[in-house]
Amino acid sequence: MSGTGPAGVPIPQRCAHLPTDSRGYPIIATVGRDEDTIDFGTVSEYRKLVLATFDLCGVCGLPFGEELRWQVGFRPEALEATGGIEAAEAPVHEICALYSAQVCPFVSSPYARLGDEYRKGARRPEQVILAGSTRTEQLCVRPSPWQPGTKILTFRMADLTRSHVLHDAEQARAAYTEALADDTPLALDTQQEQLTALLCPLTQEENGGLLAGAAWCVGAAFCPDLGAVLGMDVFARDSRYRQVAEQTVLDAGFADAYAGTKRDASLQAGLRWLSTRTELPELLKHWRRSARGRLVRTARKDNGPSQEQRRKSARRKQKAARRRNR
Ligand SMILES: [Zn+2]
């Protein structure tokens, strides 16, 4: 642990870098902000995209690595869902979920939060459910339940492995105390540190827009229907984001070389992160792999038959001619 936050609750080491508001509440990575305004009630679609692309926790903004990805909800049926949990919020580390349940005004007062029937205060939930899945299987584009006519991102989780069902504050405290006993700081490489340093502070950058642009460039541009999501049309309309993404897929050295020519710190950090990964997060790997297939097929069509194909065709013609001459 690393000091104490609101109401004397100890802060996990991995949340120590988060800025706090005037009451001492940590400003989690998914919440939209600028230098003067923090709105705990809104999550930023830009930030959700950044978290999904670089595979970061929605609370501390640090990588998941091999840890489970947790969603916080209020309906026990979610634990029975055979198709996996789908949520409008980015997944978080276990200790970050348990910490939020202690201090975040929107988790510890669940009826003030989330987009289900509880949001309107229709019914007070009896418990907080924390569900830990192995993988984030898909980033989906769905109609917003709160703003008709707009679309938002949702996270589809797969391979539910563990859960916490917290009936009251006492249980929440006990589960958090247990998690704190195993609390260790995460070891980050330089590129991961840079992304966190850009994502988490209070800056003038509006809602993570620059980092969202970087996410498009490293491969989110290939996420189906992404341009339809609230605010993402800016990137969809400007073909340069997609072009950069295509170049990074076709040319392994492009990301690092291009980063060197740019002054945008977020784009630089994103491209350098991409060029130094030995293994990409599952979502990004999937987007880039399907794009590569399309790009290679298009390149083949544009260039006509390859030399190899032409040689094969010539050999077939020669064989047919020899058979005719026998
Ligand atoms: Zn976290």
Image (cartoon, grey):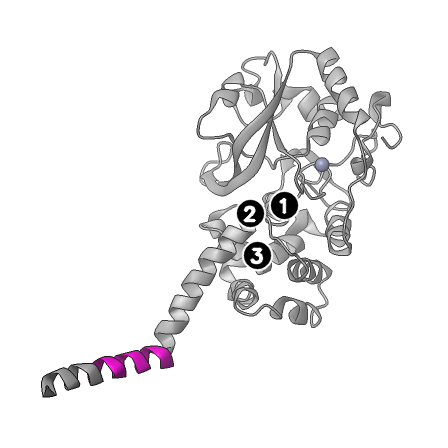
Q: Quick one: label 2 or label 3, which is nearer the N terminus?
A: 3
Contact? badges 2 and 1 (CB < 8 Å): yes
Quadrant for residue 215, please give it: bottom right
Q: Which mark is residue 89?
A: none
Q: Is residue 130 visible?
A: no
In-image side of 191 versus 22 (left or right): left
Main secondary structure of the magenta stretch: helix
The N terminus lies in quadrant: top right
Q: Secondary structure at mark 1?
A: loop
Q: Secondary structure at mark 3?
A: helix
Residues at marks 2 and 1, CA–CA distance in whole angstroms: 9 Å
In this view, 158 is above or below 139: above
Q: Quick one: label 1 or label 3, which is nearer the N terminus?
A: 1
Across and down, in percent, residue 275 comes to 65, 62
| Type of amino acid at the residue the image marks with label 3 | Trp
Magenta residue span? 306-317
Callout in the foreground (1, 3)? 1
| Type of amino acid at the residue the image marks with label 2 | Glu
Q: Which mark is residue 216?
A: 3
Across and down, in percent, residue 85 comes to 51, 30
- Tell whether position 313 is magenta: yes
The C terminus lies in quadrant: bottom left
Give the residue number, with chain letter if any, for mark 1: 55
CA neighbours of label 3 inside 10 A, class few (<14), some (14 to 19), many (20+): many
Q: Secondary structure at mark 2?
A: helix
